[in-house]
Amino acid sequence: MRFLPSQATTLVPVPFDRGQRRKGVALGPQRLLDEGLAEQIKELGWDVDVKEEMKTMCDGVEDIDAKGGGDVDGMRNPSSVSSINEHLSTLLQQVHSSSRLPVTIGGDHSLAVATLTATLTHHPEAGILWIDAHADINSPSTTPSGNLHGCPVAFLLGLEGTNVPPFNGWVKPLLKPERIAYIGLRDLDSGERKVLKQLGIKCYTMHHVDRYGIGHVLEEALSYLGAPEKPIHLSFDVDALDPSVAPSTGTPVRGGLTFREGHYICERVWETGSLVAMDLVEVNPDLGAKREEDAKATVAVGCSLIRSALGEVLL
Ligand SMILES: [Mn+2]
């Protein structure tokens, strides 16, 4: 580990679901913890602590949105999304400052407003590796749904339409377009395609994974982001995986990464020694055709992705 003095990590469960419409994603973090995630990481040789502070605040999100007026300017629940993220960002910056690796467990992907803010405040040079079926780069003015879990990247880039309250009170455009690379994309809105092309953002869709293989794609993405010399933030949305591997998620899209491709990404990022933060988001144990069976599989895969990024190897 290049940027950490010792193997110490802080797990930050954030049971937040207001960046999208489907109930249940708030149950994700507890399910991962119940699966024994903290103990599993300890067995890999890490000092592990769990910061549970966000739970209490997440219990009060309905009130926050009621006071904030609900849906505003085409955005759904901007008040709770902004205030949860502002608090989470402060908490994660403390984790970075204490030289521990923050692992944020969602909850929905709107939480990346905070995780990227904290990482880029502490490591301005960090490259963002975004593993997702979606680009999450809509702005409040381009989003077809108003769901803010589809917008975190736009806020960090400071794209047109993101300079809106309550976010403009604290979110800064800390991310440069050349400091993010996507892998796994396969479901893009038309406004997103346009902005990805305009800004020349590095995108490896599933087409590229099929054509060149995950090994080649990931080497290119890592070298593009400057690893191993530069720090890496890994933001992993479980919907990047094929729904046959991670069925319990809010916006599944067929044709995704295989079990091994997902884990390979995490293993290879660990090998660089450059990981400074990780997000694992969008596990929704309430979803999936075979409810409990699907939830178990998805929770297990969430835990094993985190373990792989924290040094679990096959041999
Ligand atoms: Mn996402």
Image (cartoon, grey):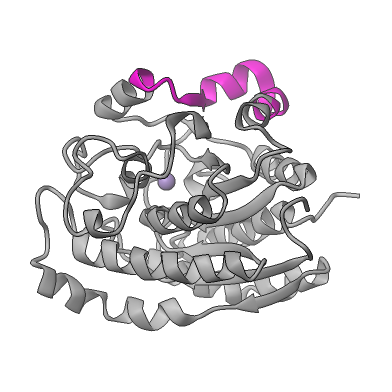
Q: Is residue 51 above or below residue 241?
A: below
Q: Nearer the viewer, residue 206 or 244?
A: 206
Q: Is residue 299 left or right of residue 80?
A: right
Residue lying at the far right of the rendered structure: 315
Q: Is residue 116 above or below residue 190?
A: below
Q: Residue at x 46, y 31 (%)?
A: 185
Residue lying at the far top of the rendered structure: 211
Q: Residue at x 61, y 32 (%)?
A: 225
Q: To which quarter of the image does residue 82 belong? A: bottom left
Q: Residue at x 28, y 62 (%)?
A: 81
In the image, is residue 218 part of the stretch drawn in magenta? yes
> Would residue 181 be seen by someone viewing this image from the given angle?
no
**Magenta extent:** 197-219
Q: Is residue 223 above or below residue 235?
A: above
Q: Is residue 269 above or below residue 33?
A: above
Q: To which quarter of the image does residue 310 belong? A: bottom right
Residue 213 x %, y %: 68, 23
> Would residue 311 be seen by someone viewing this image from the given angle?
yes
Q: Is residue 131 left or right of residue 19?
A: right
Q: Is residue 2 left or right of residue 197?
A: right
Q: Main secondary structure of the magenta part?
A: helix
Q: Residue at x 52, y 54 (%)?
A: 119
Count the labels in the image.
0
Residue 227 x %, y %: 69, 36
In the image, is residue 90 part of the stretch drawn in magenta? no
Q: Is residue 28 left or right of residue 83?
A: right
Residue lying at the far bottom of the rendered structure: 56
Residue 188 x %, y %: 35, 30
Residue 164 x %, y %: 17, 50
